[in-house]
Image (spheres, rainbow, N blue to C red):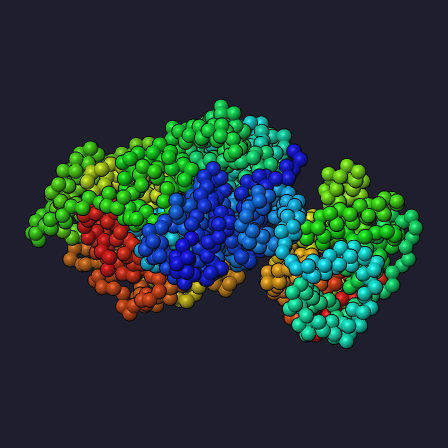
């Protein structure tokens, strides 16, 4: 490396954090996917965000690409440097910046190892839910980059579902803060966009993470099967029957042999062709009941027997073996290539059978260890990288697996990423039209292709600056009196034509689910045309066995829920005024109220979509599987964007079985302090309640005496709900926070739920009403309650507070000024529909504006739909 | 399962070893972890010219074998490291005086343990007179080739002998293998081991034994190590019985003779038979015997620190703990990471002082957190490292071999007969 450049790097970083020697650099030439390697020009190990930013600025000045790297345990070649790249290794940024056990949140640096966070959280009875097999060494930054999952994400969700906020360095070397101390960005989930972006959009220098309580009880079952396909079929049927263990894994005979021969031997049944490993978590009573049900089910579906881990030590051993399987296979294979396709769960048996056939047809050995519950396969293919013919055959087998995934309605990668390895096959899953918005995002956020070039997208897609920006003259502004035209296309084609046609005239356009012009709220600003999607309705496919439903955007929300309920399923979140909403509207506004706990929100449940860009270009994003790291997470970005990025036409959502019981407990307290303390305790300690809310006496709950109310929503089978109910009451009593009185409601359309859900009520004519929403960390939200009067509801689990107001002023005195908090303000019409949203305290605004610009460069769509205040 | 191919290609780069590597833990760069070091060994084998870098990184490996013990693919890291050490030793630049001194100490002094023990009275007197560090005060360790004199800081200030051991019994089932340095500096520990063996059927001593060769092997003096191995094999072949040592480093080396001599047709089979007879002291003791003994006269809180050459090289971790738990009146507490290396590593503490002191520094903090009053460890290097750290930190903790405690329990004693305590 050039001496002058080196001295400039030494001015930024401690010389010990700059590895410029040939041999040292050589050690950073790739990751655990070993086919592609390239030695970087230099390896930089920054220790702060400021250093990272300075590195980016220097790289920009020098025109050098950067490849971010964690522990180098990736399996798709994501950390292989590009030609001339500098590697930025985050392993020395490994501090826990803060850990607030009661708030269940931690801020960490990206080089912290997943295990180190687990070790820090465990003494507080908490854990970080994503548990990839590499977790003992992989960094949280790496987990973020690949949107890592792991066995327990079947119950708890993948990395993106546990992110709060981020600190990033953009391509200009500027530091931005995105999101905050609450899940899901608003209005654009820029945090979610970065999850799974494989280091191609920005460098992450700090992460806010959600922690969850350790389960009260755990049971681990092992069920050997005589055949791999039989094991898969048993799992498919188990899920279809509505059983929901915390983790469902399968190992085949070859994998078991390798594990048993290694240091991880744990007494796996060696004579079986496949073993299903199941884990149950929850209150002890629920675990005991679930264990019985599972045993019966497995016994009835071909399990040779069902064993159970007797002690925590055995359980640990089994999991260590499962997670060390990749390494253990190193005993059998010279080199290993792990594939990562994800298929709809009903196709799992077929997928596994055909994957094995495809690999064997190339005369290569294969062992399977995979996350069966998610339909996420991990065929481990043995080969010898020094043998060109084996490499060729591996390539053919991999391509066959890619094609199979697409054929079965699945996706190329569930949690390892496309990386370098699969980029050439991305077009199988995403057509040029589908890649268009993705590449536009890349071009807008990293116009010079600085961050991790060569990954995700095929080489021919390499973004050139300006290539995707149709820079036309700005759209004409309508005059004040001009009344927008109201369109209600009956077909998607018509809608596309409309968009394309209007394009030439640069007209501003608002998409809406409203049937009639009169139903529209206050218009957000200058608009020429209103396009109603109300005629584009209907359920296209309810794949019951796969727990997905695909609908047209204009489908009324209640109709969809009713149709799903008939089939014994549902979408698992509530929305205010359900009878007046379309599915598209719910998704576009990320509406989930008042129980946005865990993953009960459109952002977390939207698996795939079809939509139209500003000029009518059709595209698809996501898919029908629950884990997907195939390109950027557009569904997450579009959910909640309020129509400003694209017009959504079809949506694929994740359903779940109807819970046997749905209980709303309303605990009465006479004073605010006690109510607040009780709510916070429930929030901090309960393992995955479906909702925790707090309401002041001013909220009139029909038939209930005035009191401060802590609401606790519980869902599931009767045993689980009863156990959680008892558990919560016991905890509160023990803490001296026993409620004065308890009311319970089990009806989905009960009056108390309705009051909470449809808060605030729409105004009567002539009475202005404003909806204000606050988002912040739990302590901050609770701290501001004394200032808010008595017309609000706090969704503590969702970290959101809705407040009814008369005017659109910001809250004053500003209990939320300074620090991380977001305030949204929208005028309601008499139908309860929200007018344009204004935001205060929005983090990372310049970055968000680039996202907006990427998708809709002229600002045609939903102009003023949300204002960055 | 196929025989290990003795090849860095066994590694599939899964990276699980990074978790347990003490130098990666501190440094967080590839060259400081096993995965990177295996790549460096390849370069070394291939005759890579960029000596400065791989030489430095490989020398920084403490050789704790934690990576080998956790490697799911079964990479024989220890063997690969030994092979690399031979090449590194050949590459070493050192002046003629330094080389001579080194040879005198390693190949002379250390190979004749009986003669080594004669230095004990001198060291004991110097310790009492607080003159052990005299050469350091004079600055001799700053002279080229004499840096190793700082090792004087690791010599205990008191060298208690402990209660006399019962005499050997000819024909007993255990043949005791005495460690060279432990016999010199930790006589109490050795006598305690003999007392314990006496209670388990008796022991016998044998003539003609030599240093186990661990130090030589790990410093790349493989030929010297093999010679020592042959001497020990020949000496112990004459008599049946288990070969027992209380020092983890020696035990690990003795158990490895089979591998050291695997390619020597005349000795391979004999070495295998020898290694099969080797046992760590904790492997021959019976918790029931300790449980039936009177136990300690007053309750004590102790922490057991796993020597790498016990836990990683020999897989010994549960045994000593079970034996401690059998002792009445003993409260055993765990440090957060008892399995992590203390940084002693044979001569590592002299060769890599910064890394070594960072390692013991973290362990010391863990020890403080336990509130233990005794720190037990079953290897000479680890014990010296702990003794120095505890002394310098002025911590009221006695560092001892667990055998001393077990022996006390047998006799119902609580006399502080051994161990170094400061404060």
| Horizontal relation, residue A850 to residue A706: left or right | left
A332 over A44 or under it: above or below: above
Residue at image point 74% right, 75% down? B130
In the orientation shown, which residue stands out farthest toward the front? Answer: B96
Q: In which quadrant will I find the C terminus of chain A?
A: bottom left
Do we see residue A161 in this rendering?
no
Residue A580 position, x and y percent, is 24, 45
Q: How many marks?
A: 0
Residue at image point 73% right, 66% down? B155
In the orientation shown, which residue stands out farthest toward the top? Answer: A361
Residue at image point 73% right, 47% down? B223
| Horizontal relation, residue B55 to residue A853: left or right | right
Classify residue A501 by image quadrant.
Answer: top left
Classify residue B274 by image quadrant.
Answer: top right
Residue A225 position, x and y percent, is 57, 30
| Front in this rendered view, residue B157 or B196 | B157
| Front in this rendered view, residue B49 or A74 | B49
Residue A586 position, x and y percent, is 29, 45
């Amino acid at each position: 490396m050039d001496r002058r450049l080196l001295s400039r790097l030494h001015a930024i970083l401690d010389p010990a954090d700059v590895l410029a020697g040939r041999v040292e650099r050589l050690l950073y030439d790739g990751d655990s996917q070993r086919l592609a390697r390239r030695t970087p020009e230099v390896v930089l190990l920054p220790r702060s965000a400021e250093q990272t930013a300075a590195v980016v600025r220097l790289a920009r000045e020098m025109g050098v690409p950067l490849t971010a790297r964690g522990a180098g345990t990736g399996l798709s070649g994501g950390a292989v440097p590009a030609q001339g790249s500098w590697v930025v290794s985050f392993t020395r940024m490994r501090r826990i910046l803060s850990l607030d056990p009661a708030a269940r949140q931690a801020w960490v640096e990206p080089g912290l190892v997943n295990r180190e966070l687990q070790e820090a959280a465990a003494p507080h009875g908490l854990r970080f839910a994503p548990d990839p097999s590499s977790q003992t060494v992989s960094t949280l930054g790496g987990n973020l980059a690949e949107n890592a999952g792991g066995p327990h994400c079947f119950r708890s969700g993948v990395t993106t579902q546990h992110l709060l906020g981020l600190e990033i360095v953009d391509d200009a070397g500027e530091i931005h803060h995105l999101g905050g101390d609450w899940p899901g960005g608003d209005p654009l989930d820029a945090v979610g966009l970065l999850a799974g972006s494989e280091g191609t959009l920005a460098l992450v220098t700090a992460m806010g993470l959600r922690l969850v309580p350790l389960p009260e009880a755990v049971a681990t079952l092992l069920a050997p099967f005589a055949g791999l396909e039989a094991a898969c079929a048993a799992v498919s049927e188990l899920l279809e029957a509505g059983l929901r263990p915390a983790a469902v894994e399968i190992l085949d005979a070859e994998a078991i042999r390798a594990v048993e021969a290694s240091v991880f031997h744990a007494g796996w049944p060696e004579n079986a062709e496949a073993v299903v490993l199941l884990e149950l978590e929850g209150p002890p009573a629920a675990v005991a009941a679930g264990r019985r049900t599972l045993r019966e089910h497995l016994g009835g579906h071909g399990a040779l027997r069902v064993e159970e881990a007797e002690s925590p030590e055995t359980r640990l051993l089994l999991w260590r073996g499962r997670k060390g399987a990749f390494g253990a296979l190193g005993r059998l294979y010279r080199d290993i290539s792990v594939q990562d396709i994800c298929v709809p769960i009903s196709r799992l048996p077929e997928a596994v059978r055909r994957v094995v056939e495809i690999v064997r047809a190339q005369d290569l050995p294969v062992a399977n260890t995979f996350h069966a519950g998610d339909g996420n396969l991990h065929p481990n293919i043995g080969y010898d990288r020094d043998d060109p013919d084996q490499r060729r055959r591996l390539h053919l087998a991999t391509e066959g697996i890619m094609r199979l995934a697409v054929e079965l309605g699945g996706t190329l990668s569930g949690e390892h990423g496309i990386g370098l390895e699969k980029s050439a096959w991305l077009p199988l899953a995403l057509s040029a039209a589908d890649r268009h918005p993705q590449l536009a995002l890349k071009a807008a956020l990293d116009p010079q292709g600085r961050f991790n070039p060569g990954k995700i997208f095929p080489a021919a897609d390499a973004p050139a600056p300006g290539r995707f920006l149709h820079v036309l003259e700005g759209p004409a502004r309508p005059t004040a009196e001009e009344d927008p035209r109201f369109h209600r296309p009956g077909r998607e084609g018509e809608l596309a034509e409309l968009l394309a046609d209007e394009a030439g005239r640069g007209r501003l356009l608002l998409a809406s689910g409203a049937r009639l012009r009169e139903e529209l709220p206050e218009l957000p600003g200058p608009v020429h045309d209103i396009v109603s999607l109300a005629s584009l309705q209907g359920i296209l496919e309810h794949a019951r066995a796969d727990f997905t439903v695909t609908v047209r955007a204009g489908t009324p929300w209640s109709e969809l829920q009713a149709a799903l309920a008939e089939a014994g399923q549902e979408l698992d979140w509530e929305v205010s005024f359900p009878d007046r909403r379309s599915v598209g509207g719910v998704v576009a506004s990320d509406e989930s109220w008042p129980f946005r706990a865990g993953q009960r929100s459109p952002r977390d449940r939207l698996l795939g979509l079809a939509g139209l860009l500003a000029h009518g270009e059709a595209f698809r994003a996501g898919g029908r599987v629950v884990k997907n790291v195939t390109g950027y997470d557009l569904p997450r970005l579009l959910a909640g964007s309020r129509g400003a990025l694209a017009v959504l036409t079809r949506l694929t959502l994740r359903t779940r079985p109807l819970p046997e019981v749905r209980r709303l407990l309303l605990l009465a307290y006479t004073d605010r302090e006690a109510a607040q303390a009780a709510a916070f305790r429930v929030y901090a300690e309960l393992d995955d309640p479906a909702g925790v809310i707090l309401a002041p006496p001013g909220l009139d709950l029909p038939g209930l005496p005035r009191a401060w109310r802590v609401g606790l929503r519980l869902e599931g089978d009767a045993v689980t709900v009863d156990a959680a109910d008892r558990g919560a009451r016991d905890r509160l009593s023990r803490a001296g926070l026993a409620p004065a009185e308890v009311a319970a409601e089990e009806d989905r359309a009960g009056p108390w739920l309705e009051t909470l859900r449809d808060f605030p009520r729409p105004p009567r004519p002539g009475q202005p009403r404003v909806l204000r929403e606050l988002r912040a960390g739990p302590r901050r939200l609770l701290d501001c309650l004394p200032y808010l009067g008595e017309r609000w509801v706090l969704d503590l689990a969702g970290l959101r507070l809705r407040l009814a107001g008369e005017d659109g002023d910001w809250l004053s005195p500003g209990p939320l000024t300074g620090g991380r908090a977001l305030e949204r303000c929208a005028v309601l019409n008499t139908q309860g529909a929200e007018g344009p949203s204004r935001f205060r305290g929005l983090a990372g605004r310049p970055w968000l504006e680039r996202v907006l610009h990427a998708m809709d460069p002229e600002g045609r769509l939903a102009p003023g739909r949300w204002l960055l205040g | 399962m196929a025989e290990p191919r003795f090849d860095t290609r066994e590694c599939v780069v899964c990276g699980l070893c990074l978790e347990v590597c003490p130098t990666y833990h501190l440094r967080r760069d590839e060259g400081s972890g096993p995965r990177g070091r295996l790549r460096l060994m390849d370069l070394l084998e291939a005759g890579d010219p960029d000596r400065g870098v791989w030489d430095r990184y490989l020398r920084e490996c403490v050789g704790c074998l934690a990576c080998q013990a956790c490697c799911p693919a079964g990479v024989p890291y220890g063997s690969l490291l030994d092979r690399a050490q031979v090449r590194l030793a050949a590459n070493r630049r050192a002046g003629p005086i330094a080389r001579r001194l080194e040879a005198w100490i390693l190949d002379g002094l250390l190979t004749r343990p009986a003669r080594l023990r004669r230095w004990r009275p001198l060291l004991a007197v110097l310790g009492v007179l607080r003159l052990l560090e005299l050469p350091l005060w004079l600055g001799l360790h700053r002279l080229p080739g004499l840096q190793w004199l700082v090792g004087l800081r690791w010599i205990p200030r008191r060298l208690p002998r402990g209660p006399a051991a019962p005499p050997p019994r000819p024909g007993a089932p255990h043949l005791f293998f005495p460690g060279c340095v432990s016999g010199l500096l930790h006589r109490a520990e050795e006598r305690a081991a003999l007392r314990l063996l006496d209670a388990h059927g008796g022991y016998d001593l044998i003539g003609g034994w030599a240093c186990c060769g661990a130090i030589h092997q790990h410093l790349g003096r493989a030929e010297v190590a093999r010679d020592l191995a042959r001497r020990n094999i020949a000496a112990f072949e004459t008599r049946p019985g288990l070969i027992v040592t209380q020092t983890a480093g020696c035990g690990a080396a003795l158990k490895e003779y089979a591998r050291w001599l695997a390619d020597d047709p005349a000795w391979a089979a004999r070495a295998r038979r020898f290694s099969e007879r080797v046992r760590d002291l904790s492997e021959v003791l019976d918790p029931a015997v300790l449980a039936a003994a009177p136990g300690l006269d007053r309750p004590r809180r102790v922490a057991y620190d796993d020597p790498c050459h016990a836990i990683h090289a020999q897989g010994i971790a549960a045994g000593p703990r079970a034996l401690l738990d059998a002792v009445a009146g003993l409260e055993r507490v765990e440090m957060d990471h008892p399995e992590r290396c203390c940084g002693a590593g044979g001569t590592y503490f002299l060769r890599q002082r910064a890394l070594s002191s960072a390692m013991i520094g973290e362990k010391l903090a863990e020890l403080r957190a336990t509130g233990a009053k005794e720190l037990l460890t079953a290897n000479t290097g680890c014990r010296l490292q702990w003794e120095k750290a505890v002394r310098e930190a002025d911590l009221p903790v006695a560092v001892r071999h667990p055998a001393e405690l077990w022996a006390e329990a047998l006799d119902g004693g609580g006399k502080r007969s051994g161990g170094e305590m400061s404060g």
